[in-house]
């Protein structure tokens, strides 16, 4: 691509910004719809207010990132900086062991920062993107050596493992691993071999987990009762309406399906969901897609997939037109992250895969997710700014 | 700027080439990944659409059915029962169960710091033990429903909620100036479950009439059972439903409260009756048969004779409506005897719950002579001026079927007019009247007086007596003869007083009733229940004659003791042997009306198997009970005294008045029973002054001319007569001289 074609592009990527804003607006509407009937305690912020605050912080982050000099932006991926970021991410994970940690819903995954609860896992996703982008573009050839692959893959595996081990958060670990692996594969020559190995590994894990779950099921309900919840979720996924699982998680899945089904292709209309009324657990959070379907029907579904499609397409286009491979890798990481999270979330809600807690970017209620997703969009916008320069 | 960049680009030219190659490599795979993701997106849109399309109807139903779970029943309030003046006899009150949710306590954000203030609040408002609560909360961390206390009142519940609210407000304002936050009490850890509880403010007042409700709110016995459908309302419901546009609407269908019934009972008269019954029982419990009550059953009915309205209906033994199984008001021996007689604890309770006045039959005895005489007068079989010769016995029938029935007056009453026959309760005269009346007419009038039929009074559990009276087929001459003086057939109290009321009110038979108005829960009248005139049983002139005869009974006949000081009343005594039992047991009774010149109310007192040495003399207690009741009731009903008072009576009334004022100052509840006691004691000295009748040589009671034993002052009972039944088997019958100058009839 020549310099002249680059100049013709606008300095701000409007389709990207507009699709993000549309998604956030839709998200706020859905959060309002699902949470407006929850009474707000005096002196507390409502869910919508918290979400707006988080999104405001996120937008400030976007502006800051966009304003960074490219040298500094590039420097963040260079040798000392990318490791400093990893160390910070590691320390933030360790904060979960301190009194700053905040627990909810039976898990310790948050750190309290004022009114916001931040998930270190979200920060680690960005840290991995910086690390991989920096490492791979700095050492384009090393990656094809055993050492280079081992080092970069090791880092990714380490952090995915840490997130899983410390915060017991499988979905975040999967996403972190997926981002890292996708970026490494993209830069590698032997990517087909890697893909093959990863695929076999995933298949083996799935076979193992399902085998274990089914073995327990064959033994009887008591053995199922004693199963770890991850294995149990496999059984629930296969048969969510089984009364045995009503108390454990089948209920949430079934209610989400009821919501989608009862809304029909036309939907019930904004605000008219029935299933949001204390029926679906985590309705404004991981399960918000079900209410979106119930209220907006097929229109809502197509709309958000279109908006996400635009967003991902802009990431792709900006990445392809990036000034250097560093920018391309950043865009790739962000694209994989957002796309994967959307896919996983919708798969969980539609019971296409076993239940795991993934939020829907821009739509689900969740402060830290909003801040970091916006920050990632900021990275892409920063890359785009250079494209136009 | 751009120049600089180009420069740097040139400087790292070789590196730039390599980087571009890398970028190319990455870009290709990025496109690949984007395509994969796009495909995934399309798949998920399709998947979502499939769910929407294929399961729409099924899931819509599921969603709807889940909403049912969300509905809440709003219980109705059972209607109240009021007396004729609006005093509440029974009502339903909303009470609250205190429910503890341990889960909330143990799974709070402040790690259970709020348990202490919450428990302190429970302790201060409901007096619950702190240690116990703590132990319970610790031992059952996940219990969501634990009843701490049952049936607390609305005020108590409100007090608790205010306590919590005030406490938390104080803590909140305190916490603003504090580093270390004080724990708030949990306002969601304790909640209240409401329900209705039936309350009977009078405890045992009118217990037989009112009846009670079971735990599930169904009426048992009495008005509660009879008017169950009226008192019962309809549960309300709060629920959500989906409109045609699939929008959720929440709707409240309010509960329909039950209707209130206004009874004809007057609580004061009712209380007077009950207190007198209790006083009688206190005086006679264990008197002859040790450990037993004053009688097996004692019943009183007070009725408005011009409408059939029941002013009071009471019986002894009684029970506590608020705790129907409670037997603590009776002594252990009494309870044991009751259980033995009825054959079990359950049966004993049921015996108490049954209303003696309507659900037990007995042979009425001489009270029924009035009906025989009235029937004979009304149909013209006899007339007022006729007289009958009593030789002391009467033989009827022919040959081997010849039967002789003796009068209690061994040597005969001589020539008696109809009036005297009633006054003296002469059996022979009555039998002679019965012969003139004939069987057919006797039975016609008996049915007309409603004997053998239910009165259809609005109470549950009225007894059927159709098989307990004679009909054309099974009534022989002997049966007719005994029936003329009230033996051989069975009646209930309510039948007898209803029939008697028609005798003295001009001949109009009213269906007795207890409810005169039905109101809705707001007090608006739903229905007025008017007196129901069934038929005219005797002519007005006959009714006037009967009033005259009955006044004679109290003025100079067997019922002298029943007259309350200052009033003139009419009435008829009755003493009946309980047939079919080896032992000599009697049912004694007095039926009266007042005042004499313008009858307004009828009073009927029945003592079944009085616990006295000679039961047949129990008739006097029936008379005295009637007198005590009327002494209180007549002034209360604004009926003025018409008769001069003797010095003794004046003194007695004054004392009673003093007692009354005293009682009003202290406690009016026990006034009536105390008065009854006073009357008993003031009367006794007079009883021992014995005069000797020069003619016959018998001791004479100065008040009523009763023959007495000179040594003890107790009435003499040496008059027996032989009664032979149709088979010629002699049956010994006590001739009674209870209250009637020794001229009381046998088998009364």
Image (cartoon, coloured by chain):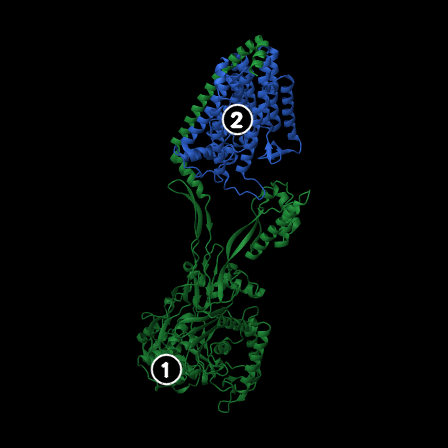
Chain colours: A blue, B green
Instruction: Name the mark on residue B544.
Output: 1
Q: How crowded is mark 1: few (under 14 residues within 10 Å), some or many (20 or more)?
A: some
Q: How crowded is mark 2: few (under 14 residues within 10 Å), some or many (20 or more)?
A: many
The residue at the point 56 percent across, 72 percent down is B668
Q: In this view, does A12 lie to the left or right of B183?
A: left
Q: Nearer the viewer, mark 1 or mark 2?
A: 2
Q: Mark 2 highlights which residue?
A: A213
Residue at the extreme bottom of the image, as rendered? B694
Given residues B109 and B290, the one toward you in this image is B109
Given residues B254 and A339, the one toward you in this image is A339
- Measured from the top left, where is residue A232 in percent x and y? 53, 29
* C-alpha span from label 1 to label 2: 100 Å
Given residues B594 and B469, the one toward you in this image is B594
Q: In this view, does B321 lie above or below B389?
A: above
Residue B490 visible in the snapshot:
no
The image quadrant of residue B669 is bottom right
Q: Is residue B579 above or below residue B224?
A: below
SS for tag 2?
helix
Given residues A180 and A327, the one toward you in this image is A327
Q: In this view, does B133 lie to the left or right of A336?
A: right
SS for tag 1?
helix
């Amino acid at each position: 691509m020549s310099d002249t074609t680059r100049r013709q592009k606008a300095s701000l990527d409007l389709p990207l910004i507009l699709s993000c804003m549309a998604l956030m607006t839709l998200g706020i509407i859905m959060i309002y719809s699902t949470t407006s009937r929850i009474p707000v305690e005096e002196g507390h912020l409502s869910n919508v207010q918290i979400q707006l605050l988080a999104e405001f912080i996120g937008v400030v982050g976007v502006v800051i990132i966009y304003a960074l000099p490219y040298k500094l932006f590039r420097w963040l991926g260079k040798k000392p900086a990318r490791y400093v970021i990893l160390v910070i991410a590691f320390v933030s994970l360790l904060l979960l062991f301190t009194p700053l940690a905040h627990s909810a819903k039976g898990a310790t995954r948050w750190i309290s920062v004022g009114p916001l609860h931040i998930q270190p896992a979200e920060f680690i996703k960005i840290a991995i993107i910086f690390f991989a982008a920096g490492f791979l573009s700095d050492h384009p050839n090393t990656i094809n050596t055993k050492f280079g692959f081992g080092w970069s893959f090791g880092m990714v595996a380490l952090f995915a493992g840490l997130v899983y081990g410390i915060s017991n958060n499988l979905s975040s670990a999967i996403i972190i691993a997926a981002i890292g692996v996708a970026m490494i594969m993209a830069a590698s020559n032997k990517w087909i071999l890697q893909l093959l190995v990863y695929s076999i590994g995933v298949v083996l894990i799935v076979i193992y987990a399902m085998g274990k779950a089914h073995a327990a099921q064959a033994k009887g309900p008591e053995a199922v009762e004693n199963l770890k919840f991850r294995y149990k979720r496999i059984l629930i996924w296969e048969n969510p309406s089984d009364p045995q699982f009503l108390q454990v998680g089948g209920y949430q899945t079934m209610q989400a399906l009821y919501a989608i089904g009862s809304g029909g292709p036309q939907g019930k209309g904004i605000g008219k969901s029935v299933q949001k009324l204390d029926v679906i657990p985590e309705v404004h959070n991981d399960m918000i897609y079900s209410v979106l379907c119930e209220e907006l029907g097929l229109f809502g579904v197509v709309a958000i997939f279109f908006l996400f499609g635009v967003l991902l397409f802009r990431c792709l286009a900006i990445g392809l037109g990036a000034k250097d491979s560093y920018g391309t890798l950043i865009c790739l990481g962000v694209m994989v992250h957002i796309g994967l999270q959307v896919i996983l979330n919708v798969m969980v809600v539609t019971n296409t895969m076993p239940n795991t807690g993934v939020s829907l970017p821009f739509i689900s209620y969740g402060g830290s997710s909003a801040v970091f997703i916006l920050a990632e969009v900021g990275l892409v916008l920063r890359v785009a700014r250079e494209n136009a320069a | 700027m751009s120049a600089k960049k180009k420069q740097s680009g040139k400087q790292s030219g070789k590196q730039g080439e390599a980087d571009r190659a890398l970028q190319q490599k990455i870009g290709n795979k990025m496109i690949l990944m984007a395509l994969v993701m796009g495909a995934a997106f399309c798949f998920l849109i399709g998947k979502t659409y499939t769910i929407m399309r294929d399961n729409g109807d099924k899931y819509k139903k599921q969603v709807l059915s889940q909403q049912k779970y969300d509905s809440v029943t709003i219980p109705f309030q059972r209607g109240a029962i009021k007396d004729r003046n609006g005093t509440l006899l029974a009502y339903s009150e909303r009470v609250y169960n205190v429910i503890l949710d341990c889960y909330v306590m143990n799974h709070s954000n402040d790690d259970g710091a709020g348990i202490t203030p919450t428990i302190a609040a429970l302790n201060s408002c409901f007096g619950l033990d702190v240690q116990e609560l703590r132990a319970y909360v610790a031992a059952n961390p996940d219990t969501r429903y634990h009843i701490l206390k049952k049936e607390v009142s609305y005020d108590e519940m409100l007090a608790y909620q205010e306590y919590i609210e005030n406490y938390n407000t104080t803590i909140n304002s305190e916490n603003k100036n504090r580093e270390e936050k004080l724990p708030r009490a949990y306002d969601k850890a304790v909640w209240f479950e409401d329900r209705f509880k039936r309350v009977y403010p009078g405890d045992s007042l009118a217990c037989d009439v009112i009846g009670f409700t079971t735990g599930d709110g169904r009426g048992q016995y009495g008005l509660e059972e009879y008017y169950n459908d009226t008192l019962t309302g309809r549960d309300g419901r709060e629920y959500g439903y989906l409109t045609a546009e699939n929008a959720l609407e929440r709707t409240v269908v309010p509960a329909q409260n039950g209707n209130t019934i206004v009874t004809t009972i007057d609580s004061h008269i009712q209380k007077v009756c009950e207190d007198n019954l209790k006083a009688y029982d206190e005086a006679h419990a264990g008197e002859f048969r040790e450990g037993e009550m004053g009688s097996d059953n004692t019943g009183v009915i007070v009725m408005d004779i011009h409408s059939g309205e029941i002013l009071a209906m009471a019986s002894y033994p009684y029970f506590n409506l608020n705790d129907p199984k409670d037997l603590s008001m009776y002594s252990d021996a009494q309870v044991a005897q009751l259980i033995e007689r009825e054959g079990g604890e359950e049966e004993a309770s049921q015996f108490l719950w049954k209303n003696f006045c309507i659900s037990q039959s007995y042979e009425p005895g001489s009270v029924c002579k009035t009906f025989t005489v009235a029937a004979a007068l009304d149909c013209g079989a006899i007339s007022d001026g006729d007289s009958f010769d009593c030789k002391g016995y009467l033989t009827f029938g022919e040959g081997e079927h010849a039967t002789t029935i003796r009068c209690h007056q061994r040597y005969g009453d001589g020539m008696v007019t109809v009036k005297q026959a009633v006054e003296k309760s002469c059996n022979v005269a009555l039998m002679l009247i019965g012969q003139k009346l004939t069987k057919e007419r006797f039975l016609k009038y008996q049915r007309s007086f409603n004997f053998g039929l239910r009165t259809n009074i609005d109470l549950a559990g009225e007894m059927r007596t159709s098989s307990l009276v004679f009909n054309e087929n099974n009534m022989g001459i002997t049966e007719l003869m005994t029936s003329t003086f009230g033996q051989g057939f069975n009646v209930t109290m309510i039948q007898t007083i209803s029939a008697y009321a028609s005798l003295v009110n001009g001949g109009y038979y009213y269906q007795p009733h207890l409810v005169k108005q039905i109101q809705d829960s707001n007090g608006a009248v739903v229905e007025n229940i008017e007196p129901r005139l069934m038929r005219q049983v005797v002519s007005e002139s006959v009714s006037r004659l009967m009033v005259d005869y009955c006044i004679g009974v109290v003025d100079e006949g067997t019922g002298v003791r029943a007259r309350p000081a200052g009033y003139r009343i009419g009435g008829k005594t009755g003493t009946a042997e309980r047939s079919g039992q080896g032992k000599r047991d009697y049912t004694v009774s007095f039926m009266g009306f007042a005042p004499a010149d313008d009858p307004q109310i009828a009073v009927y007192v029945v003592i079944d198997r009085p616990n006295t040495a000679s039961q047949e003399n129990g008739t006097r207690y029936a008379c005295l009970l009637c007198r005590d009741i009327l002494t209180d009731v007549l002034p209360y009903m604004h009926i003025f005294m018409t008769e001069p008072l003797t010095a003794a009576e004046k003194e007695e009334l004054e004392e009673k008045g003093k007692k009354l004022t005293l009682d009003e100052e202290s406690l009016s509840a026990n006034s009536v029973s105390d008065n009854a006691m006073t009357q008993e004691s003031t009367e006794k000295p007079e009883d021992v002054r014995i005069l000797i009748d020069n003619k016959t040589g018998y001791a004479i009671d100065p008040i009523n001319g009763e023959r007495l034993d000179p040594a003890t002052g107790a009435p003499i009972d040496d008059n027996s007569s032989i009664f032979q039944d149709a088979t010629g088997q002699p049956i010994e019958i006590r001739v009674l001289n209870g209250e009637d100058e020794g001229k009381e009839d046998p088998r009364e």
